Image: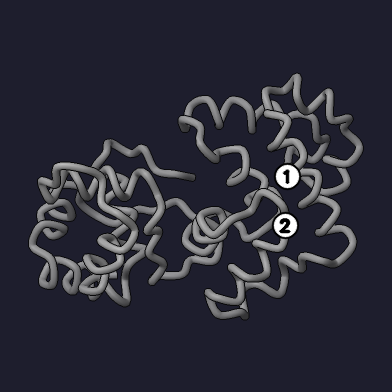
Amino acid sequence: MQKALRHLTTSDPVLGRIIETIGPYSIEFRDPCFDTLVRSIVYQQLSGKAAATIFGRLAATSAEGQVTPGGILKLRPSRMRKLGLSGQKTIYIRDLARHTLNGGIVLDDLPGLPDEDVIEHLTRVKGIGVWTAQMFLIFALRRLNVLAVNDLGVQTAIRKAYGLDELPKPAQVERLGQSWQPYCSVACWYLWRSLEGQAAL
């Protein structure tokens, strides 16, 4: 990881200052499993605290202490709503459970696929877009070069750190991130941490 930090610090002095302030790279990875994908859906467009509360309630419905496809489909949609999930997210999570059980989504295959194929595979599921797939790539599959150009946290951190008047467009993030390759995931993590740990997952 020292090689990545040297590259980012040398190629982008602004990011280098963020790295110096934050300190060591200490990302918390999760297993590339169904539970992690459900977590990412729950966290969409919510604060970390609210999402963690809702996900905790959902996990508590399982005897295994982990969210499973079978466990999800045993829950009535109305029960899922009472746990704090929106109607849309309830639909998304149930759709993911069905895809996982019927073989439409094969999570065990994902570690061996290129990033683009992982995104294509996961976005077959209603409610899983490119952002959610990218979070899975970064936090579960531990891919080092994923640039989340549409992530609000990344955009907010860039505006703050680079002194921009408004949030950068995805194309601007893409251009800025060219100098971060092949360690864009590491850059994103430091940008999230620069907002006092308000990371997406």
Q: Please report the residue visible at 14 percent of the width from the left and 46 percent of the height from the top.
A: 164
Q: Residues within 10 Å of mark 1 (few under 14, many from 20)?
A: some
Residue 42 rendering spot, x and y as whole percentages: 61, 38
Observer-nearest residue: 181 or 168?
168
Q: Please report the residue visible at 71 percent of the width from the left and 63 percent of the height from the top.
A: 124
Residue 114 rendering spot, x and y as whole percentages: 55, 80
As drawn, which residue projects farthest toward the top? Answer: 82
Query: What number is the disc on residue 92?
Result: 1
Tell me how far mark 2 sits from mark 1, CA to CA: 7 Å
In the rendered image of this protein, does residue 174 appear above or below residue 151?
A: below
The earlier-in-sequence mark between 2 and 1 is 1
In the rendered image of this protein, does residue 149 appear above or below residue 181?
A: above
Residue 14 rendering spot, x and y as whole percentages: 10, 57
Question: Circles 2 and 1: CB distance less than 8 Å?
Answer: yes
Residue 51 rendering spot, x and y as whole percentages: 55, 31
Query: What number is the disc on residue 125?
Result: 2
Residue type at the position of mark 2? Val
From the image, which quarter does the N terminus lie in? bottom left
Q: Please report the residue visible at 46 percent of the width from the left and 30 percent of the height from the top.
A: 47
Q: Secondary structure at mark 1?
A: helix
Lateral position of residue 200 relative to residue 198, left or right: right
